[in-house]
Image (cartoon, rainbow, N blue to C red):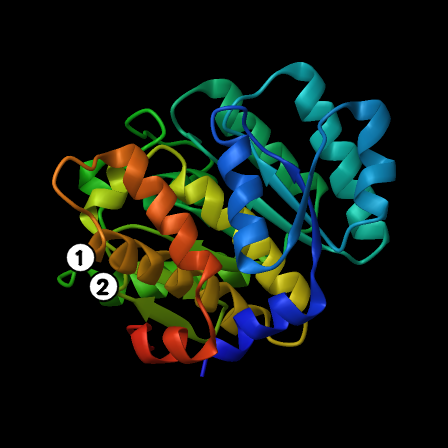
Amino acid sequence: MLGICIENVRKNLPLVHNITNYVTVNDVANVILACGGSPIMSDEPLDVEDITSICGGLNINIGTLNKSTIEGMKLAGKKANELNHMVLLDPVGAGASKLRTETAVSLMDTIKFDVIRGNISEIKTLALGSGTTKGVDADAADTVTEENLEQMVEFAKNFSAKTGAITAITGAIDLVSNSEKCYVIRNGRPEMGKITGTGCQLSGMMTAFIVANPDNKLEAAAAAVCTMGLAGEIGWSYMQDGDGNSTYRNRIIDAIFNMNEKTLDEGAKYEIK
């Protein structure tokens, strides 16, 4: 069962270094706190090696790039690899611009990642070295559906075999896979797409989960996806007349704060392929 993974986060209090985008940085910090971890945010090249050295995991998110943050990402990633820390890549908007695509590919060439988490368009871009996304959202043509599920599961497994990283593809149907086993997850609400940064929040939380569960990284990554999706369901159940996406964002964070092993095990909706 996946619920033990969140209990391990709360027990181990993992410290996570986030080089994430300034659109969602506050929400990422709050979600990591809500699940039981502790966040540190730093992207200054002169600072990142010291900061990542005291953490157990590094979350790299390319949502708002500049030359300085790219340098910081590479320095932090190299240091994290030297220390055998967990490292996650969130290739936000890869395929939307040349800089994002080239940066994501370059990071993959220079840093060993434990998990690569993105939407299907972003992951396809990394697999092919080029692609298209609708801004930072997946292209409609790339949606994981019941009709193409088997094909997408095979794609996720092959990408994991190629990169050596766990592949986490999030969307209406989520896939969390290594080269041999794939969790197909159906938690969540479509309204979550109306909130900026649920994917960024998930990447920060997922890093905390894999740091706290180093011997079960695949299960931990899947548990993080289930936690976020289930929190979306629980948060939506508390919505009232007059509530909007700002209230929903807070209700999701509250649901993560109140999540426990029993709630997650009872609410997680997944199968393994």
Q: Which mark is residue 145?
A: 1
Q: Quadrant of residue 110?
A: top right
Could you tell me how far apart the alpha carbons at marks 2 and 1 are, in whole angstroms?
6 Å
Say what amino acid the circle numbered 2 marks: Leu
Mark 2 residue crowding within 10 angstroms, few (<14) / some (14–19) / many (20+): some
Direction top: furthest residue = 67
Q: What secondary structure is marked by label 2?
A: helix
Say what amino acid the circle numbered 1 marks: Thr
Mark 1 residue crowding within 10 angstroms, few (<14) / some (14–19) / many (20+): some
Q: Is residue 251 visible?
A: yes
**Image side of residue 207 versus residue 232, left or right:** right
Please give the residue where the numbered disc 2 appears in the rendered image. Answer: 149
Q: What secondary structure is marked by label 1?
A: loop
The reply to whether dot 2 and dot 1 touch (C-beta < 8 Å) is: yes
Residue sitting nearer the eye, 259 or 97: 259
Q: Residue at x 25, y 58 (%)?
A: 233
Q: Residue at x 28, y 63 (%)?
A: 187
Q: Is residue 8 above or below residue 110?
A: below
Tell me how many marks there are.
Answer: 2
**Image side of residue 108 versus residue 250, left or right:** right
Q: Residue at x 61, y 57 (%)?
A: 208
Q: Residue at x 46, y 68 (%)?
A: 223
Q: Quadrant of the C terminus?
A: bottom left
Q: Which mark is residue 92?
A: none
Q: Is residue 258 above or below residue 53?
A: below
Percent position of residue 173, x then y: 26, 58
Direction front: furthest residue = 241
Percent position of residue 35, x then y: 54, 58
Percent position of residue 37, x then y: 63, 56
Q: Quadrant of residue 162?
A: bottom right
Percent position of residue 176, x then y: 42, 63
